Image: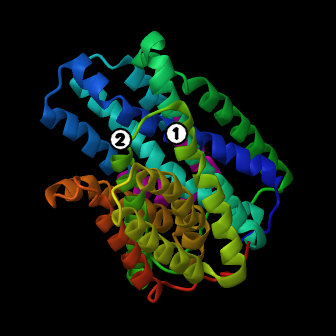
Amino acid sequence: MAPATLSPVRVYWTAFIGLFFDYYDLFLFIYLEKVLAAHFGLGVGESNALQFAGLAGVGVGALFFGYLADRFGRGRIMLAVFGVYLVGVAGLSLAWNYPSLLSFRILASLALGAEWGISHTFVNEQVGPQRSYRFAALLQLAILGGLLAALANKYLLPTWGWRWLFAASLVPVALLSLARGRMLLRGERTGTVAAGREIAQPVSLGAALLMNARAFLLCFALASLTIASGLVNVFFVKELPQTPIFIVLFWANLAPGMLLGVWVVRRGGVRRALAVYGIVLMMLSLFAWGGAGEQRKLVFALTLPALNGIPFGLMGAYFNEVFGSYRTMLSGAAYNLGRILAGFSPVVITALGLHTGGNYFLFSGALGLGVLVLCAGLPPGARVSAG
């Protein structure tokens, strides 16, 4: 891996802003589900198809653009991804019927799936191994784009309308594309930017997939379990009062968890950090399940984001350690395909009848147990003590 050659702050912000607005549009689409259904006269099947298209898009985007990034350069392909994103979001803001809404939804989702893997690998490559976990955790704070989407939906939707909420992200991402392009061109002219591509692959793509199959399945399982925990909380939180202070705390509580994860990784490695997460998740779930009081529900809802910050913050750096060749594609696919599987957790909760009587907590406790069991088989990573 090339040594750190660009300003870490500049590298970080050019990756963070793009990922932040991708998360904004992803969650905004979820918040606007009923609004869009009413505007376009959608049935249940059409609304479900839109949600499934979003999930499928992130998986395909991670695989396709991740492969291109490994072959032709992370920075360059990220610029192409920004272009796809701009077209997708502009189309969403101008959608005139259901087919156009579905098509542009897929485009925007392709960009989000590509963005996670490329951003994390690009930052990891440029800042160097000693700072990889710290910057990966800080980059994952881009998920707070979901907080912006929640506040925009609550306070701006009545006056702006849903089309302008989508269009609001076009200008910052366009400016970001120009800034990133200038940075890459200047870096390539002066020889101060890592190439970010693997021209002479030591193995073929097929051989790489076979060599990494076990590690990929384990990372995919880790992403599925931990992301499902976050989705369970979002599903559960809809029952609680949606006051402004609650919304802010719910999203902002991710940050301390991510920083805690970095601290634990520095001192004990990835497995220990995930073991702490699994044990505390089980204890928190049992605490909430053991009583029916509203205070226990609030404690669960506001503590779980901080706890989920631990795996969310470390996966970007850890997945880059686990995989060698084609690491952009494999790391991005493990995370985003895990996101697809986790997306079905609310369906599972409802099918099992766990959505009533506080039984969400049995499901989240089982997720914690699953992570704890998974820890024994996870690859240790190349630099588990790096921060």
| Residue in the foreground of this view, choosing between 387 and 296 | 296
Residue carrying label 2: 238
> Which label's residue is closer to the chain start, 2 or 1?
2
Compared to 173, does 193 lie above or below? below
Which color mode does the image show?
Answer: rainbow
Q: CA distance from mark 2 to mark 1?
A: 12 Å
Q: Is residue 61 magenta?
A: yes
Determine the image quadrant of residue 17. top right
Quadrant of the snapshot with the N terminus = bottom right
Quadrant of the snapshot with the C terminus = bottom right
Give the secondary structure at mark 2: loop
Q: Is residue 211 visible?
A: yes
> Where is residue 289 shown, x and y percent of the image?
34, 64
> Where is residue 318 shown, x and y percent of the image?
58, 72
Per the rendered image, the range of residues in magenta is 59-83
Determine the image quadrant of residue 96. top left
Crowd around label 2: few <14 · some 14–19 · many ≥20 (10 Å): few
Give the secondary structure at mark 1: helix
| Residue in the foreground of this view, choosing between 234 and 216 | 234
Residue carrying label 1: 246
> Where is residue 190 shown, x and y percent of the image?
86, 51
Q: Is residue 31 magenta?
A: no
